[in-house]
Amino acid sequence: MDATEDNLNEAMARHQIELPRPQVERLDRYCRLLWDWNAKLNLTRHTDYEKFVARDLIDSLAIAQFLEPGETVLDVGTGGGVPGVLLAIVRNDLRVSLCESIGKKARAVADIVQQLGLATPVLNARVQEVLAAERFDTLVIRAVARLKKLLEWLRPHWNAFDRLLILKGPSWLDERGEARHYGLLHDLALRKLTSYPLPGTDSESVLLQIRRR
């Protein structure tokens, strides 16, 4: 085991996270590939193992526990591949696709996915375009836009997916109120699935599920 993997293991141990060794090795490889690309293109602010584990891995594992075996999942606005690439690594039963509208980011994450040997399509398109052509069980969304904007984008496309899983921070209650004010939740059921502390802050992360009523 090399020093970089040691560091990832140590960061995971600090957060009481245990995963099979092959997954840890692939996550470590993902970090190095992501950080190499990050020197050329701004894909992440989490450029050490502690930040990767405390934010990216914890968020991805929170989502993973609410996905059923064999689900088709679309990561909307994947950026550098979180949570989609991590879900594909820790849950190889899932069929994960990555959606990224910015071409240079899509090309970077496609290179990362290819080097990791993952069978994870990277779709360089807006989510509306993807949903016009394909159907998914679950859309996962992290750090893309306010709830109002997301629901406006997706409102015409509910026939193309069953539910949304959205990670939000402390402002989620304000965002819910705004979405309600504009009538975007009247035919939808929003449920808080889980919440957990945001390491190093007084805030918490919240995982929301939204379905049609």
Image (cartoon, helix red, strand yellow):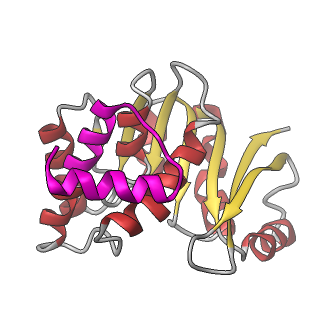
Q: From the viewer's side, name the closer residue of 137 and 119.
A: 119
Q: Quadrant of residue 148?
A: bottom right
Task: Please tell me which residue is depicted at 63% across the width and 47% down the height of the picture.
Answer: 165
The magenta stretch spans residue 17: yes
Residue 46: horizontal and vertical position, in percent?
35, 71
* Image quarter (top left, top right, bottom left or bottom right) of the C terminus: top right
Task: Please tell me which residue is depicted at 84% across the width and 72% down the height of the picture.
Answer: 177
Write the start and end of the magenta stretch as one range: 1-30
**Left or right, residue 113 beside residue 120:** left
Residue 120: horizontal and vertical position, in percent?
29, 33
Q: Kindly tell me whether residue 77 is visible in this rendering.
A: no
Q: Kindly tell me whether residue 132 is visible in this rendering.
A: yes
**Left or right, residue 95 beside residue 26:** right
* Image quarter (top left, top right, bottom left or bottom right) of the N terminus: top left
Count of numbered labels shown in the rendering: 0
Task: Please tell me which residue is depicted at 33% across the width and 58% down the height of the picture.
Answer: 101
Q: From the viewer's side, name the closer residue of 26 and 181.
A: 26
The magenta stretch spans residue 150: no
Q: Quadrant of residue 43?
A: bottom left
Q: From the viewer's side, name the closer residue of 37 and 23.
A: 23
Q: From the viewer's side, name the closer residue of 51 and 81.
A: 51
Task: Please tell me which residue is depicted at 84% across the width and 63% down the height of the picture.
Answer: 183
Majority secondary structure of magenta residues: helix
Q: Is residue 130 above or below residue 183?
A: above
Residue 198: horizontal and vertical position, in percent?
61, 70
Residue 94: horizontal and vertical position, in percent?
45, 26
**Left or right, residue 140 beside residue 78:** right
Q: Is residue 175 above or below residue 15?
A: below
